Amino acid sequence: MRVLLAALVATLAALAMASASAAQPREGFGDLAEELSPAVVNISAAQRMRSDDNLPTFPPGSPLERFNDLLGDNPRVASSLGSGFVIDASGLVVTNNHVIEEADEVEVVFTDGRTLPADIVGVDPATDLAVLRIREGNGDFPFVRFGDSDATRVGDWVIAIGNPFGLGGSLTAGVISARGREIGGRYDDYLQTDVAINRGNSGGPLFDMDGRVVGVNTAIFSPTGASVGISFSIPSNIAEPIVRQLAEFGETRRGWLGVNVQAVTADTAEALGLSSPRGAIVSRVDADGPAYAAGVERGDLILAFNGEAVPDDRRLPRMVADTPIGTRASLDVLRRGEPLTLEIEVARLDEPDAAPSRPAGTPDDAQAPSPSSRTLFGLTLAPITDALRRTHRLHPDARGLVVTAVEPGSDAAGKVRVGDVVEEIAWTIVDSVDEARQIARSAAGETGRPVLFSLNRQGQFVLQSLRP
């Protein structure tokens, strides 16, 4: 009896353990892979390239005549591979612009082996996004949805599915390493991850653990060309509205104010009376833009746009770009220490519209200081003369004191360049070195507070804060 009872207890225990094991979810990303992979596609883009028309041809009867066919008008085909993902059942596909750029033919390849031609609906080089539409099919394609990239945190798990080196359907996993990365574009706000991203992953989706697309894999940082654990993805909250515009209009329709802005440094914030750096300083106002019509001026500090705080100079262009054309928006600015609110109508950005490059400035050894120049805050200043105007190629509108030298090791080094013209100090116009010295000393006070210098840099307005 005891033997039977012991055997029964052992059997029940084994059944309980088996039941608990079956009820426990499996570890890993297998379930997500099975669910999401059918909507991730390989992108094959082909460009037909014709031979150079300037190549020589051989005359009839020449022993080399047979080579004319090789050197003539026969097209060559250049192809590229990338990744993409379907976002609706009708066959709308998202990928990177650089994957299909200048392509004559585009095909998408599904995990089940189907290869279907696709048309390019629209591209946006500024963010490197493109939208395709599958030309054939039953209109019942598997698809995935965008998620909320703003809800992602550093340390969250993410996975990428794509076509690295032509190996379609590859899944890699990692975590979000950082947010808000800038790598050289106008609207950069990349998610940085340690997910393995390689050639061919471009345009593929970055998923969160709910299976939503929180990023579009776009670039890697690598000295070798292969993954070293630093990759960048366009956040879904930037990509989704652009994709929506490309799908609807075939182009982007971004908002525009007609201003250039610069960052607020810690010293500039202190000089402006701010507790911390925030907002964006207007460095240029386009005469034909809505900002000019609204009364925006150089040197205005934009603190809020349409009721939303402006955290920095990088965020403002995004905020404006995402605003519907024709919107009447408010602009909260700080002008020479006085707050005011301006009303502005958002216009449409005429694209492509490359931001004007910053002038390089005049070499530091352009000219030795003139006898009448004096030093202030590490700057050697001199009244503008015709000779200095020619030597430093000053802008015709420049008025004030020209910088003829910058003292190495001073606070001005790296902030001010030889050839810059100091037009205002602490928002006060300066015409002489003595006047500039008095104004600067008064603004700095006994504690040596940073002082604002308004500079004309070959026609560009630059605001810098300098310490004595």
Image (tube, rainbow, N blue to C red):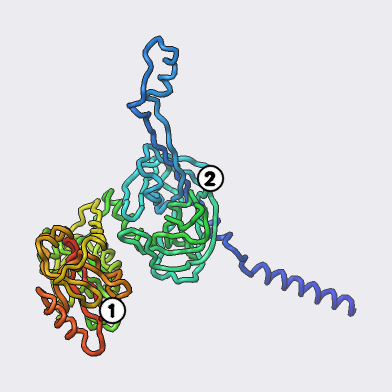
Amino acid carrying mark 2 in the image: Asp
Residue in the image at 36% along x and 52% along y: 129
Where 364 sits versus 245, above or below? Answer: below
**Which residue is at the front of the view, 94 or 298?**
298
Left or right, residue 331 beside residue 176: left
The residue singled out by tag 1 in the image is: 267
Pointers 1 and 2 in contact (C-beta within 8 Å): no
The residue singled out by tag 2 in the image is: 112
Residue found at the far front of this picture: 371
**Which residue is at the front of the view, 107 or 67?**
67
Q: Residue 66: horizontal and vertical position, in percent? A: 44, 16
Residue found at the far top of this picture: 61
Amino acid carrying mark 1 in the image: Asp
Give the label, 1 or 2, closer to the camera: 1
Q: Residues within 10 Å of mark 1 (few under 14, many from 20)?
A: many
Q: Residue 336: horizontal and vertical position, in percent? A: 15, 78
Left or right, residue 9 beside residue 363: right
Left or right, residue 295 beside residue 318: left
**Which residue is at the front of the view, 35 or 354?**
354
Residue found at the far bottom of this picture: 446
Residue in the image at 27% along x and 50% along y: 251
Q: How crowded is mark 2: few (under 14 residues within 10 Å), some or many (20 or more)?
A: few
Displayed quadrant of residue 22 = bottom right
Does any portion of residue 202 appear in the rendered image? yes
Q: Residue 392: horizontal and vertical position, in percent? A: 18, 60
Residue in the image at 24% along x and 71% along y: 280
| Label tally | 2
Q: Quadrant of the N terminus?
A: bottom right
**Which residue is at the front of the view, 214 or 428?**
428
Where 406 sits versus 446, above or below? Answer: above
